Image (cartoon, rainbow, N blue to C red):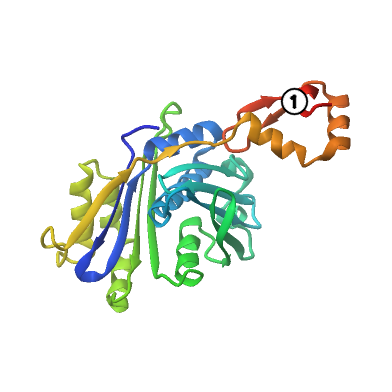
Amino acid sequence: MDSSDYLIRGVVNPLAMRFTLTETTATVTEAVRLHDTDPVSTIIFGQALTTAILTSPLLDGEERYTFRWEYYGKLRRVIADVSSTAKIRGLIGEPHLMTEAANENEIYGDEDGQLSIIRADHGKILHSGITRAGLLDVVDDAAFFFSTSDQIETEFECEIRLNPDPARPVERAVGIMLQALPGCDLKRFDGIRRELHGDRIRRLLTDIMPSEKKLWKVLEELTGNAYPKNNADLVYSFPVHPGYQCNCSQERLREAMLALGEGQLRKLFETSPNPGIKCEFCNRVYCFTREDFGL
């Protein structure tokens, strides 16, 4: 984890609007390093991870969100699994879209995909939902999910800027989420959400400046300098630092392999006396022996 990444959560009281602002540059850099993504895949993967991190303040305690985007194009799927402390892991179906897809249509496909989000606590599902992913964009499809399935008007903006230096492929990864709270003027919220995608906001998000200064400038720009006027208008905190963190372990993968059953495990060890199983989220390889399964 790199503490240069931050997450700010808060509320603009006069507007009854909740927000999360995050920088995920170090987190996305670690993710694309582990998954060896090319520039096109890096942008999509970075947007998915940043979007999921923006929702982490909606979780409590040990809860986790698991986002699963599925499309009919070359991208196939993107998964992001995030904790309430903004620790995330993920995977992308095609890490080399630049060579595999000629255009955006080939990336996402011609048909609507789907997005499922599961909220769980220690493996127990607390809530799950599925919506169509018809906007064919991981960020916009997530906003559609929360606005329809969870019935909370939601908007995201995520910016991923790349470096030509392969040692530092991600120059900036930033994002913001807005949500309407009870009592929010939805007509005004719609105007703010449109402003969220303007060039001025994109520039402010990617500018290098202290995080709190950026927060005030972005909100002032979104509201036409109407809010926040003072500290009473804006309540916010820095509860966590995002980071890429896989929760795999030798024991977790051993338990997963037990699902194969004794017969299949014996066949596996006949083929390979010391099989290595790779975690899809971090590419770490765990090796096993017959003794691990009492065979």
Relative to 76, residue 140 above or below: below
Residue type, label 1: Asp
Horizontal side of residue 19 vs 279, given as left or right: left
Q: Which residue is mark 1?
A: 292
Decide which of 37, 189 is in the foreground and name it: 189
Residue 259: x, y in percent? 77, 42
Q: Quadrant of the N terminus?
A: top left
State which quadrant residue 291 falls in. Answer: top right
Relative to 19, residue 172 above or below: above
Tell me the residue at 45%/49% (across/down). 47
Tell me the residue at 30%/63% (across/down). 18
Relative to 239, residue 132 above or below: below
Mark 1 element type: helix
Residue 257: x, y in percent? 74, 36
Horizontal side of residue 46 vs 263, given as left or right: left
Whether residue 171 appears in this view of the structure is no
Q: Residue furthest left?
A: 230
Decide which of 168, 240 is in the foreground and name it: 240
Residue 233: x, y in percent? 16, 63
State which quadrant residue 256 falls in. Answer: top right
State which quadrant residue 276 falls in. Answer: top right
